[in-house]
Image (spheres, grey):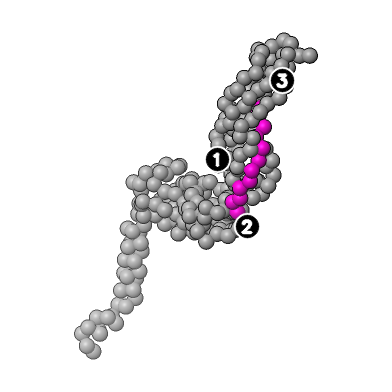
Amino acid sequence: MHPLKDWLVKNIGLKFLSFFFALILWFYVNAKGMIEVNYVVPLEYHNLSSSLRMVGETVDYVDIRVKRREGFQNQSNSPQMNAMVDLSEAKTGETVIYLTEKNIRTQNPVEVMRISPRAIKVRLEPVVTKSVEVVAEVVGKPAKGIVLKGMEVNPSTVTVEGAKSLVDQLHKVSAGPIDLNGAHKTFSQEVFLKLLGKEVRVVDHSSVMVRVILEKEQ
């Protein structure tokens, strides 16, 4: 028998056992120092068309479990990791987006074991504009014997912009309030429009001039 072949055949069981233990040792050495950690990371929405607007409740954070080597920064909220959703292909209506390790961005080499929630819902509506009335609000009472005759608002209307379902429900924007306590004659005052929230905004003005007309009580 050829010497090399004879060496390979002889004690083949022992050689296989040695190889098996060597393989176990290799896995042990490479796995040593690896730990699993949970992080709560911010979820960012990118590349949304300017003609669309997110409405309703959104998921702003996700919980992820990763396997990483010991020695990396261990915080419940890691500044070196976040999640990102690309909305460049999103359409009007409700969309279900499934999160995978491709949605996780990190500066350190990690293995993503779990993401929660695994799927999120995003509801998108077209952005529309609309002209609505400005209504000035007042508080307090003028001086004794003086009454509020009326108010002139300039401009009397403003343009609002936002998701269609929200803009359709909007018919006025409030300004003020204007304090009437002790007032005894007609006066003008600049007052700011009240914020409408992050989903609807006034596009052409932040304040209006209000002429408050006061007269003696008849």
Q: Residue at x 32, y 58 (%)?
A: 29
Q: Which mark is residue 122?
A: none
Tell me if residue 196 is in the magenta stretch: no
Helix, strand or loop at label 3? It is strand
Q: Residue at x 72, y 10 (%)?
A: 144
Q: Which residue is mark 2?
A: 93
Of callouts 2 and 1, the N-terminal one = 2
Q: CA distance from mark 2 to mark 3?
A: 48 Å
Q: Nearer the viewer, residue 128 or 78?
A: 128
Q: CA distance from mark 1 to mark 3?
A: 29 Å
Pointer 1: residues within 10 angstroms few (<14), some, or many (20+)?
few
Above/below status of 151 relative to 52: above
Q: Which residue is mark 1?
A: 204
Q: Position of residue 37 (x, y in %)?
A: 44, 48
Of callouts 1 and 3, the N-terminal one = 3
Q: Position of residue 32 (x, y in %)?
A: 35, 54
Nearest-to-viewer mark from 2 and 1: 1
Above/below status of 93 relative to 155: below
Which secondary structure is most common in the magenta stretch? strand
Q: Residue at x 47, y 46 (%)?
A: 41
Q: Which residue is mark 3?
A: 148
Q: Quadrant of the C terminus?
A: top right
Tell me if residue 136 is in the magenta stretch: yes
Q: Residue at x 34, y 66 (%)?
A: 23
Which residues fall within the magenta stretch? Answer: 126-137
Residue type for callout 3: Leu
How many labels were placed on the picture? Answer: 3
Above/below status of 216 relative to 78: above
